[in-house]
Image (cartoon, rainbow, N blue to C red):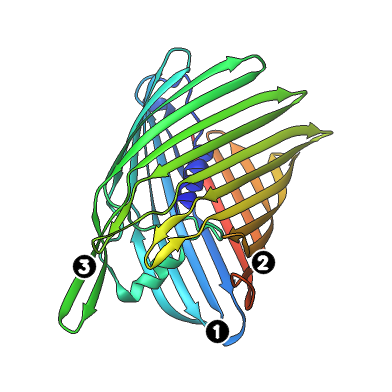
C-alpha cells in the first residue's frame, strides 16, 4: 500500500512539474488525472475481478518565486465481483494531502511541511471491507491504495549540489501519524469500531543524475523505517522498505528511448499470528517516444516479478501506449495498457491467471 502511494505521488509530480521561478497566481498549475483499472484473478466461476475508477486532482499555487503550496485528493470507486456479480464495493473521497515548499539559495535547499487530512472513508462497514482491502497490493498496484489513513504531519528537507559530472540530491523526512477508526463490525445489535494507529515513518532518499552523451541517467534509492502499528491493542511491524529506481534516456535517430526500472525490498516484519516474511518486487520497462505532428507517441512494455520469502509469488507483463498533445496552456495525455500474468501459491501448488487493463487521461493546465 505504501509503494502505491509513493508511485501516486511520483505521478502527480510528473503531471504538475516544478514551478521554478514562478511568481504568483498567474503561474498556478492544475491537473486532473482520471484512471480506470480492472484486474481479473483466476478463471471460471470462482474468478475475482477488482475494478477501480479514480479521479485524482492536484492544484499547485506558487505564492512567491521561493514558496509554493500544493493540494491533492481523489474520488475513487472500487468494486470486487465474482462470476460477474458484485460482492463488495466502496466509493468516496480519499484523504487530502496538503504541502508547502520553501526553496533557499540557488534551488539547492528545499524545506517541506505537509499534512494528510482525514477527508476519506472511515469506520468502513463489513460489506465494504473486501473492496477496501483488495486495493492495497504492492504487486498489482491500484491508483488509489487506501481510502483513509488518518491525520498525519510530515516535515522534510532536501539538499542538492553538483559533484563533478553528477547532480546529487539528499532528502530526509519524518511523518507523525495518529490513530483513526478504520473499520466497523456489527454483531446483532452490537457495533465494534476497530481503531488503527499507523507507525511513525522516517524516510531518507539519495538521488543522482548526469548527462551521458546526448542522453541522461537518473538513479535513486529511498529507505523507509517504520515503528510499530497498533490494532486491537496488538503491536505489529510491517518491516522497513528499500526502493531503488533508475532511468536511462537516450535519443536514437528521431526517437527517444527510455530504459527504466524500480525494485522494492520489504524486510521481515511482524503480523498477527507470527512473522511476516520479507518480499521483493522488481520491475523493468522499455519505452520509445516519437513525434507525429502535434502528438508525442510512446509505446511501452513492462515486466514485473514478485517474490515472498524467496518463493515465486507473481509475474506480470504490461504492454501499452501513452500519448501527449499540447495546445497553449493545456496538455492532454491519454494512455492505455493491457496486462497478463500469474499469481503463485507460495511453496508450489495452485496458480492463478491474471489479466487486466488500465486506462488513464491526464489534463494539465499551466
- The one nearer the camera, 356 or 255, is 356
- Crowd around label 3: few <14 · some 14–19 · many ≥20 (10 Å): some
Q: What residue occupies the far bottom of the structure in this picture?
A: 45
Q: Position of residue 123 (x, y in %)?
A: 25, 65
Residue displayed at 47% across by 62% down: 53
Marking on residue 341: 2
- The one nearer the camera, 116 or 38, is 116
Residue displayed at 49% across by 26% down: 170
The residue beneath circle 3 is 193
Separation (CA) of disc 2 from disc 1: 17 Å
Q: Position of residue 314 (x, y in %)?
A: 62, 64
Q: Eyeballing the image, is 141 above or below 20? A: below
Q: Quadrant of the N terminus?
A: bottom left
Q: Eyeballing the image, is 30 above or below 285? A: above
- The one nearer the camera, 317 or 299, is 317
Residue displayed at 41% across by 54% down: 238
Marking on residue 2: none
Q: Position of residue 133 (x, y in %)?
A: 41, 66
Separation (CA) of disc 2 from disc 3: 37 Å
Residue displayed at 58% across by 53% down: 280
| Left or right side of 232 for 88 | right
Which quarter of the figure has residue 41?
bottom right
Q: Position of residue 364 (x, y in %)?
A: 51, 40
The reply to whether discs 2 and 1 touch (Cβ–Cβ < 8 Å) is no
The residue beneath circle 1 is 46
- Crowd around label 1: few <14 · some 14–19 · many ≥20 (10 Å): few
Amino acid at each position: 500500500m505504501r509503494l502505491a502511494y509513493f508511485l501516486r505521488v511520483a505521478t502527480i509530480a510528473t503531471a504538475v512539474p516544478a514551478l521554478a521561478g514562478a511568481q504568483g497566481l498567474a503561474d498556478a498549475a492544475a491537473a486532473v488525472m482520471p484512471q480506470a483499472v480492472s484486474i481479473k484473478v483466476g478463471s471460471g466461476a470462482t474468478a475475482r475481478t477488482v475494478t477501480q475508477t479514480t479521479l485524482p486532482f492536484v492544484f499547485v499555487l506558487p505564492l512567491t518565486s521561493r514558496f509554493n503550496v500544493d493540494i491533492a485528493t481523489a474520488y475513487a470507486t472500487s468494486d470486487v465481483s465474482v462470476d460477474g456479480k458484485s460482492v463488495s464495493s466502496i466509493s468516496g473521497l480519499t484523504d487530502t494531502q496538503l504541502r508547502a515548499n520553501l526553496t533557499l539559495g540557488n534551488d539547492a535547499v528545499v524545506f517541506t511541511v505537509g499534512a494528510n487530512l482525514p477527508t476519506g472513508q472511515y469506520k468502513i462497514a463489513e460489506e465494504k471491507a473486501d473492496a477496501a482491502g483488495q486495493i492495497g497490493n504492492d504487486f498489482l498496484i491500484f491508483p488509489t491504495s487506501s481510502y483513509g489513513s488518518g491525520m498525519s504531519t510530515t516535515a522534510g528537507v532536501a539538499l542538492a549540489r553538483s559533484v563533478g559530472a553528477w547532480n546529487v540530491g539528499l532528502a530526509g523526512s519524518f511523518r507523525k501519524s495518529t490513530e483513526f477508526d478504520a473499520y466497523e463490525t456489527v454483531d446483532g445489535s452490537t457495533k465494534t469500531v476497530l481503531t488503527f494507529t499507523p507507525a511513525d515513518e522516517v524516510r531518507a532518499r539519495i538521488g543522482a543524475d548526469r548527462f551521458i552523451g546526448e542522453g541522461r541517467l537518473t538513479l535513486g534509492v529511498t529507505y523507509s523505517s517504520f515503528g510499530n502499528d497498533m490494532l486491537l491493542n496488538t503491536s505489529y511491524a510491517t518491516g522497513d522498505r528499500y526502493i531503488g529506481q533508475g532511468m536511462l534516456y537516450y535519443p536514437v535517430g528521431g526517437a527517444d528511448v527510455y530504459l527504466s526500472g524500480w525494485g522494492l525490498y520489504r524486510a521481515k516484519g511482524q503480523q498477527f499470528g507470527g512473522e511476516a516474511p520479507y518480499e521483493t518486487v522488481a520491475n523493468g520497462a522499455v519505452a520509445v517516444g516519437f513525434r507525429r505532428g502535434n502528438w508525442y507517441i510512446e509505446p511501452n512494455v513492462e515486466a514485473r516479478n514478485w517474490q515472498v520469502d524467496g518463493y515465486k509469488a507473481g509475474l506480470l507483463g504490461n504492454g501499452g501506449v501513452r500519448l501527449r498533445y499540447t495546445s497553449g496552456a493545456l496538455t492532454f495525455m491519454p494512455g492505455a495498457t493491457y496486462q497478463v500474468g500469474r499469481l503463485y501459491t507460495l511453496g508450489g501448488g495452485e496458480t492463478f491467471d491474471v489479466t487486466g487493463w488500465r486506462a488513464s487521461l491526464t489534463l494539465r493546465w499551466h
